[in-house]
Amino acid sequence: MKFLYKLEKKFGKFAIPNLIVYLLFGQGIAFILSMWNPYVVYDFVFNWQAILQGEVWRLITFIFIPQATSPIWFFLVLIIYYSIGTNLEKTLGTFHFNFYYFISLFMSMIICAIFNISWPIASYVNQTLFLALATLMPDTTFYLYFFIPVKAKYLIVFYFVLLGMEVLSGGITILLLILASSTGYIIYFAIPALKGQRMRIKARPAQKNYNQQHQQKQQRSGEVIKVAFHKCNVCGKTELDDPEMEFRYCSKCGKEFCEEHLKNHEH
């Protein structure tokens, strides 16, 4: 979507690299605190009424509520979400991964404020990260309980079944909260799918602008140093060879290719 690239060009410099690392680090601190005092996480939950009464830290701390209470499971969750987050940032780009995550959080906060919902809403947003990765790489194999191989596209079905059960038990407010937490997924995946499009990774305006400025600076000093952000693993072409060339990641091997070699390469 063009408006996303315009946003990236204007605000891309404010994007947080390795966002998932900071999120998981915060969850790690919260988990340690919860082991010392199990009730501390209740003070982290997003609660609009409490925020209005001065507990403004809840505007941020709800992001860091641990998604598991057992040390073993929490450690596994960290590994899983680190892998998912880094792969998504690599595929979408730093700015788009930031936008995906924070727009989903923001919309969830609005729903919670309107309906006065006190809920660990970041957990829903984090779950959509798995959904996004599974959509990008449907043939990726996950191992349930470490030994049951299941492809991501089948886990998507299971994911929606669980959400359906939550909606049946929680009603319209939970449905709205789930939709709000899926805002990033809707923007980057659902809407393009409804339009018959597929998500494309291309040389982004902010990156092109950086390349141009960097080259102009080097030319003034008598040197020309070209910087490429995308490179085909087969032919070696970059966006510097053709600014209109589009690049995508293979869902099977995870490597980056130009359109010509995306479906014409060896694994």
Image (tube, rainbow, N blue to C red):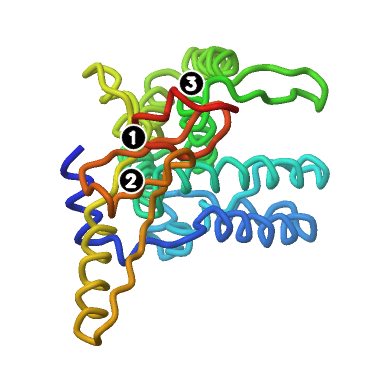
Place of residue 9 in the rendered image (x, y in percent of width and height, measured from the top left): 21, 58
Q: Residues within 10 Å of mark 2 (few under 14, many from 20)?
A: some
Residue 45, label in figure: none
Place of residue 86 in the rendered image (x, y in percent of width and height, measured from the top left): 55, 48
Q: Residue at x 38, y 32 (%)?
A: 185
Counting every numbered tag in the picture gives 3
**Tag nearer the camera, 3 or 2:** 2
Q: Residue at x 83, y 43 (%)?
A: 72
**Secondary-structure class at tag 2:** helix
**Mark 2 highlights which residue?**
103
> Residue type at mark 3?
Gly
Q: Is residue 12 above or below residue 185?
A: below
> Residue type at mark 1?
Thr
Can residue 119 be seen in this snapshot?
Answer: no
**Mark 3 highlights which residue?**
170
Place of residue 61 in the rendered image (x, y in percent of width and height, measured from the top left): 52, 58
Where does the C terminus fall, quadrant-wise? Answer: top right
Q: Is residue 20 above or below residue 155?
A: below
**Secondary-structure class at tag 1:** helix
**Secondary-structure class at tag 3:** helix
N-terminal-most mark, 1 or 3: 3
**Mark 1 highlights which residue?**
183
Q: Residues within 10 Å of mark 1 (few under 14, many from 20)?
A: many
How far, Cα to Cα, is label 1 from label 3? 19 Å
Q: Residue at x 74, y 45 (%)?
A: 74
Q: Residue at x 43, y 57 (%)?
A: 59
